[in-house]
Image (tube, grey):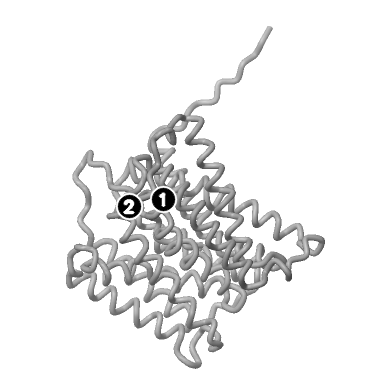
Amino acid sequence: MVVTLSIPRPTPRARIVIAFATVYLIWGSTYLTIRLAIDTLPPFLMAGSRFLIAGLILFAVMWRRRATREHLTWRQWRSALIVGACLLLAGNGIVTWGEQYVHTGLVSLIVATVPLWMALMAPIFGGRWVRWKAAIGVAIGLAGVVLLLRPGGAAPTEWQTFVVPLSPLLWAFGSLYAQRAHVAKQAFTAIAMEMVAGGLLLGIVGLLSGEAGRTHLNHVSASSLFAFAYLIVFGSLIAYSAYIWLLHHVSATAVSTYAYVNPLVAVALGAIVLGEAVTGLTAVAGLMIVAAVALILTSRARPRDGAVAKVPEPLTEVA
C-alpha cells in the first residue's frame, strides 16, 4: 500500500504574504551578510563573483525555458553594461566596499534614500517634477542624511563615509535610465545580462585595485563562504524573483514598501548580530529617512486595477 502525502498549495493571499516576507527579510538581511562575507573576502571580487554566478545561473534557467532564445543585440548588451555599471558596480560595489568602514545599519539608512534621488532626477528622464507631498519627503530625507553624516553625527567622519551616499545616487540614476533603455524583451533575461555585465565590471575593479594579490583562500572563513552563498541564492535569485512576482500581482506602491522596511531589518540585525550601537541620533535620523521614503512612495499614483506594473529596477537591492 502506497501512502502519498498531499501538500496543499498556498492560497493566493498566502503566496502574497510569503513573497512580501521574503523581500522584506532577505533584502534587509543582505547588509549583514555582505559584512560577514567581506570579513575574509575582498569586497569587489566578492561582489563581482556573486553577480556573475547569479547572472549565469539565471541565464541557464531562462535558456532551459527557451526564454533566452531571442537574438540579443549589441544595443541590448550596451544598455546592460550601463545599467550594470550604475546599479552593481557603483551602487552595490560602493555599499560592499563601504561596509568595511561604516556600520551596516547606517549604510542601509543611507541607501534607503534611493527614492529621494529618483524623485529629484525624474525630470531629467522625462518624468514629472515632485508634488508638494513628495517635496516635503525629499526635504525631510535629506535632512536625515545630513544628521547622519554631519561632524559629530551618528556616522564615522572618515572620508570613506562620504563616499557611501554616491551609491543610492548612482543607483537611482541607473534605475531611471533602465526604464527607458533598450533591453531584452524578457525581464529575467535583461536582469541576467545586467548581472553578468556588472559582475565583470566589479571583477575588473577588484583586479585593478590589487585584491587578487591580497586574497588567500586558505584564510577564508566558513562564515564568509556561507554569507557569499546566501547572497547568490537568496539575495540575488530568490528575493529578486519574489520581487518581480509581486510586481505582477499587487500594486507597485504596495511593493515599494520594502524600501522603508529593509532598513529597519538591517539596523536590527546589525545591533543583534554584530553589536552595532543604535544611538538616539541614529534612531531620529533613521525615522526621518523612513518617513521621507513613505511620503515619496505614497505620493505616486497607483496603477489601474488589473494593470500590470512596468518592471523597474529594485530600489534597495543595492545590497
Q: Residue at x 45, y 58 (%)?
A: 84
In the image, residue 260 lies at what x, y percent?
Answer: 40, 64
Pick the front one: 226 or 43:
43
> Looking at the image, is mark 1 or mark 2 earlier in the sequence?
1
Residue 90: numbered disc = none
Residue 156, quarter of picture: bottom right
Residue 254: numbered disc = 2
Q: Is residue 232 left or right of residue 130?
A: right
Q: Residue at x 51, y 42 (%)?
A: 58
Of all residues, the one furthest to the front in this rendering is 74
Q: Is residue 294 left or right of residue 19?
A: left
Residue 171, quarter of picture: bottom left
Q: CA distance from mark 1 to mark 2?
A: 31 Å
Of all residues, the one furthest to the top in this rendering is 1
Give the mark toward the camera: 1 or 2: 1
Pick the front one: 146 or 211:
211
The residue tagged 1 is: 77
160 is higher (above) or lower (below) than 302: below
Q: Amino acid at mark 1?
A: Trp
Describe the element under mark 2 as helix, strand or loop: helix
Q: Amino acid at mark 2?
A: Ala
73 is higher (above) or lower (below) than 271: above
Q: Residue at x 54, y 57 (%)?
A: 199
148 is higher (above) or lower (below) than 95: below
Q: Is residue 304 left or right of residue 4?
A: left
Tell me the crowding category of disc 1: few under 14, some 14 to 19, or many 20 or more residues within 10 angstroms, Cα based: some
Tell me the crowding category of disc 2: few under 14, some 14 to 19, or many 20 or more residues within 10 angstroms, Cα based: some
